[in-house]
Image (cartoon, rainbow, N blue to C red):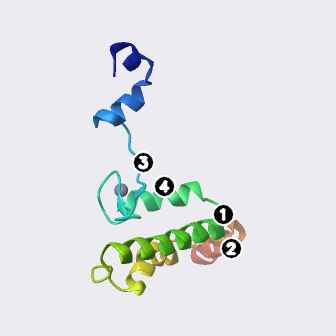
Amino acid sequence: MTEAQRDTVPLHQRALRQGEHAPREHLPARPLWLCRACGQPWPCGQAKLDLLAEYQGSRVSLCLYLATSLCNAIDDLHRLNSSMTGSTADLFDRFLGWLRACRPSAPAEHAGSAEAKETGQ
Ligand SMILES: [Zn+2]
């Protein structure tokens, strides 16, 4: 890359190429399905938070995205080394199981009535 070409590349793209301190998204690196940013099995904790924010109000879409990712991960990991893939149940828990603990919040009127019962109002 010449000096003239380097000047035309946006700064954030140069930083990514050089591995400098650019913000990195917690996306999966295929075929290993490890997080590109932190190296943890994807979806890592930050990826889960990012997904919940991105798909807020679209829980079915989030489930479909994660289910598709699970299918791709099973294929990729099985091709790499089927003896190291682990069970499909483990992968299911990794990709979709955490959603059970992140149930959508109750509608406001139910939350309000529950709060009223607790305080005796
Ligand atoms: Zn991560």
Residue beneath disc 4: 50
Q: Residues within 10 Å of mark 4 (few under 14, many from 20)?
A: some
Q: Amino acid at mark 2?
A: His
What quarter of the picture does the N terminus occupy?
top left
Q: Earlier in the sequence, mark 4 or mark 3?
A: 3
Quadrant assignment, res 35: bottom left
Label drawn at residue 110: 2
SS label for mark 2: helix
Percent coordinates x, y for residue 16 in the rendering: 35, 36
Residue furthest to the right in view is 109
Mark 2 within 8 Å of ligand 1, using the beta carbon:
no
30 versus 107 height, above or below: above
Quadrant assignment, res 65: bottom right
CA gap between label 1 and label 4 equals 13 Å
Label drawn at residue 25: 3
Residue beneath disc 1: 58
Judged by depth in the image, the label closer to the viewer, 1 or 2, is 1
